[in-house]
Amino acid sequence: MKPEKRTATRTAAVAFLLVLALSLPVSGPAAEQGAKELIVGCDTGFRPFVFIGPGGSFTGFEVELWRLIAQRQGLPYRLIRMDFASLIPALAENKIDVALGGISINAEREQIIDFSYPHFHSSLRLLVRMSDEAIADIGDLVDKVVATKEGTTSATFVSNIQTRSVLLFPSIDAAYLALHKRKVDAVLFDSPAIGDYLQTSGRYIAKTVGRVHQRQSYGIAFQQGSALRETVNVEILKLVEEGRMDILFREWFGYVPQ
């Protein structure tokens, strides 16, 4: 009879501890967010930061950075495809929680959304056809048609220089295609995206000319006042200190930016 009594006592104790554990508030970042599934808007037309891989899944430097942060913090999330021009309005209207896509941090955007610490420093470059000898820099665009991606800092920049006209495309791939088909004379866009294009499909048909323009930095974007900002910032600092950020840089760019 004594063993049965001990078993019953042990079972009762375990049951009590289980009830006690379930009654206590759960701590940690995911709990603080109420285990809400975060909606992460992604502009998948920005290689190598955010794009759709061969298997149809989201991938890229920024996607992997976000996955690493979310995993460490226990944050549930869902990635959705969006046009770049829709990302910032969607955040401002609280339709999504996070946005990825090489989003440049600037004063205008900071007034309506929040950003993480910068995770990549960039600039703008001018792309022309390989055979073009007439364009050496933006000063030669006075009588030229220039293409870029709508809703970007590149679009703002090119609207303030002298050109014959500017064509805005929903994706940078469409702008590259327009250059290849001679519908435009040049493309002005972010240097890492142009660099990726020149290493892949554009290797033998285009080249960069001139100096770099408008240095800028990318950040993960949030709704204004989002508690996620501080959580993500702490993780970014930890990843830098642990050397994990350097691993991501080497994986996606082949070097560690200075």
Image: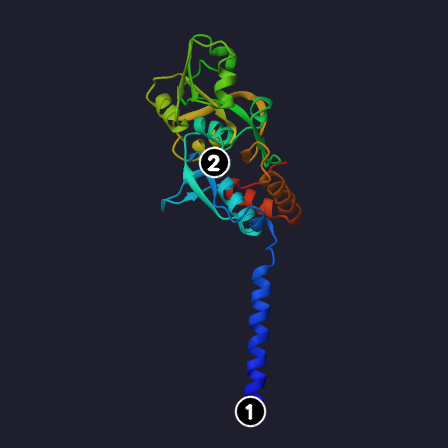
Q: Secondary structure at mark 2?
A: loop
Which disc number belongs to residue 181? none
Which disc number belongs to residue 1? 1
Q: Is residue 81 visible?
A: yes
Tell which of 252 and 39 is nearer to you: 39
- Please provide percent x and percent y for residue 113: 56, 29
Q: Measured along the vertical axis of the image, is residue 101 above or below residue 124? A: below
Q: Secondary structure at mark 1?
A: loop
- Please provide percent x and percent y for residue 91: 50, 31
Q: Measured along the vertical axis of the image, is residue 128 above or below residue 237? A: above
Horizontally, residue 31 falls left or right of residue 179, namely right
Q: Are there few (<14), some (14-19), or many (20+) residues within 10 Å of tag 1?
A: few
Which disc number belongs to residue 96? 2
Quadrant occupied by the N terminus: bottom right
Tell which of 125 and 205 is nearer to you: 125
Q: Based on the displayed image, in which of its 4 quarters is residue 109 positioned?
A: top right
Which residue is located at x 59 percent, y 74 percent? 13
- Please provide percent x and percent y for residue 25: 60, 55
Circle 1 or circle 2, nearest the eye: 1
- Please provide percent x and percent y for residue 31: 57, 51
Horizontally, residue 238 falls left or right of residue 194, namely right
Q: Amino acid at mark 1?
A: Met
From mark 1 to mark 2, how far is it between C-alphas?
Answer: 61 Å
Tell which of 215 and 211 is nearer to you: 215
